[in-house]
Amino acid sequence: MGESESLPEALSQQVLQRIVETLSLKEAHGAEGGPFIELCSVRGGEPVGTVRVFEGAPLDHVTTVRIVQPAIRLDSHMIFAFSDPGSALPHFTVDAVEAGGVYAFHLDLIPRVDIGAELDWLNGVLQPLTPAWESGRKIPGLSEAKLSPRQLSLMSPWMLAKRADAAAFRAISEPVNAYLDHWLALQQSGLPAQAQCALSPADLRDRDARNRAAIFNADVDPVWNQLAPLIGEEMGERLRELLKSQRS
């Protein structure tokens, strides 16, 4: 990989390609046959990014948000892969960013149940991530990202959310692939027998809707207010509604 290439974009494209090809997903295009949404600057109207959506069983949908604005030194690539809303399978997310010359990322399998009350689910779904989580935390050149306790409470304790230098950012491909391998295996084989939970599909769907509403809340995650001057508050709200939506 050449130095002029975007490390966040390369990582994001690698992950997206694996998800789409492994699960045979189809892209949902916009009205003109291109990306689902074209993002433009609210000031000059110039293109600053794209939103792509992919659909197909067993998932609900995969949404990617790419925002690249050299003028403010922003290179941001987000992937949220949402499992079936009526299942207890976790969602997968990876966010890869370079902002002002500093790299950052977060990586997680988002819980679908109350992990404090569902030990079997915890053991079967998240505990297997522990070796990758431990090795990922030890990569030289990483430092903690600044997240509030409220943000942390909505994700899993296995989330890796770090700032990184260039060498460390390259090295995170190992834990990213480990998390992705585990998540894809769950999607293909389903929950382990010992990890089944007592919640009904209706209860799981309701919890998922409330969980997504909290995760994609502009009061909880300050990144949405930071993006508003670039893409506008209306487009920010549209993106949040898309990420919160249950499409299947």
Image (cartoon, grey):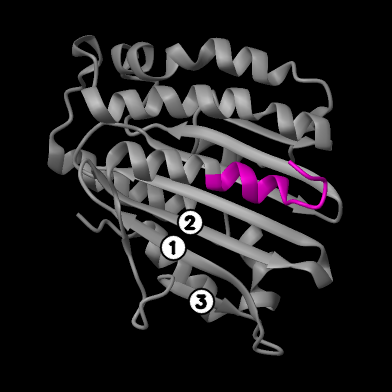
10 Å crowding of disc 1: few (<14), some (14-19), many (20+) = some
10 Å crowding of disc 3: few (<14), some (14-19), many (20+) = some
* Residue position marked by numbered label 3 in the rendering: 38
Labels 2 and 1: the sequence-earlier one: 1
Residue 230 horizontal side relative to residue 58, left or right: right
Residue type of the residue flagged with mark 1: Arg
Q: Quadrant of the C terminus?
A: bottom left
* Residue position marked by numbered label 1 in the rendering: 52
* Residue position marked by numbered label 2 in the rendering: 64
Per the rendered image, the range of residues in magenta is: 1-13
> Is residue 43 visible from the viewing direction of this image?
yes
- Residue 49: x %, y % from top left: 60, 70
Q: Is residue 213 above or below residue 69?
A: above
Q: Secondary structure at mark 3?
A: strand
Q: Residue at x 51, y 76 (%)?
A: 38
Distance between mark 1 and mark 3 Cα atoms:
9 Å
3 and 2 marks in contact (CB < 8 Å): no
